Image (cartoon, rainbow, N blue to C red):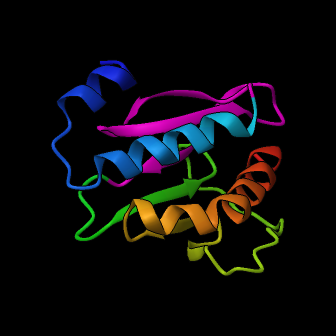
Amino acid sequence: MTFDDFMAALDHPHKAAIETLRGIIMAVDPVIGEGIKWNAPSFSAPSVTGKDEWFATFHPRAKSGVQIILHRGAKVRGYTGTIDDPDQLLEWLATDRARLSFGDEADIAPKREPLTMILRQWIVQL
């Protein structure tokens, strides 16, 4: 199933917000790819090894709003880097995983620039 097929079939109260976030993520860097991983819309980028790694996955079954889980690929691994997050958008779930939460589409606009900054930092540290 492609990303577009998944989105066409998705019945979600914040589908427009997911599409807006998708556009923001894809605009961060032309190396970013998209697909369906773990039964959810996901994004990949080349890692320092040159291999594409999944780094962001929507959590379409979140109880409220829209959530994106940022991670360091499919395998758990230690992480010692830092992410500048002055707006405190990241909720760290583990040393290699963080959650971004958005209430609805209106909640995205004021967070667009800090989100873009976080994503740029994240993908160069894969």
Quadrant of the frame with the N terminus: top left
Residue at 26% across / 71% down in the picture? Answer: 64
Front-most of residues 19 and 50: 19
Q: Position of residue 104 (x, y in %)?
A: 37, 65
Q: Is residue 58 above or below residue 69?
A: above
Does residue 44 appear in the picture of this structure?
yes
Q: Is residue 51 above or below residue 57?
A: above
Residue at 75% across / 74% down in the picture? Answer: 85
Q: Is residue 28 a member of the stretch shown in magenta?
A: no
The kind of secondary structure the magenta stretch mainly shows is: strand
Q: Is residue 24 left or right of residue 84?
A: left
Q: Is residue 61 left or right of residue 113?
A: left
Front-most of residues 78 and 85: 85
Does residue 53 appear in the picture of this structure?
no
Q: Position of residue 45 (x, y in %)?
A: 68, 32
Q: Position of residue 79 (x, y in %)?
A: 74, 63
Q: Position of residue 35 (x, y in %)?
A: 45, 26
Quadrant of the frame with the C terminus: top right
Residue at 83% across / 45% down in the picture? Answer: 124
Q: How many marks?
A: 0
Q: Is residue 50 a member of the stretch shown in magenta?
A: yes
Q: Is residue 54 above or below residue 92?
A: above
Residue at 82% across / 71% down in the picture? Answer: 84
Q: Range of the magenta residues?
A: 30-59
Q: Is residue 107 left or right of residue 73?
A: left
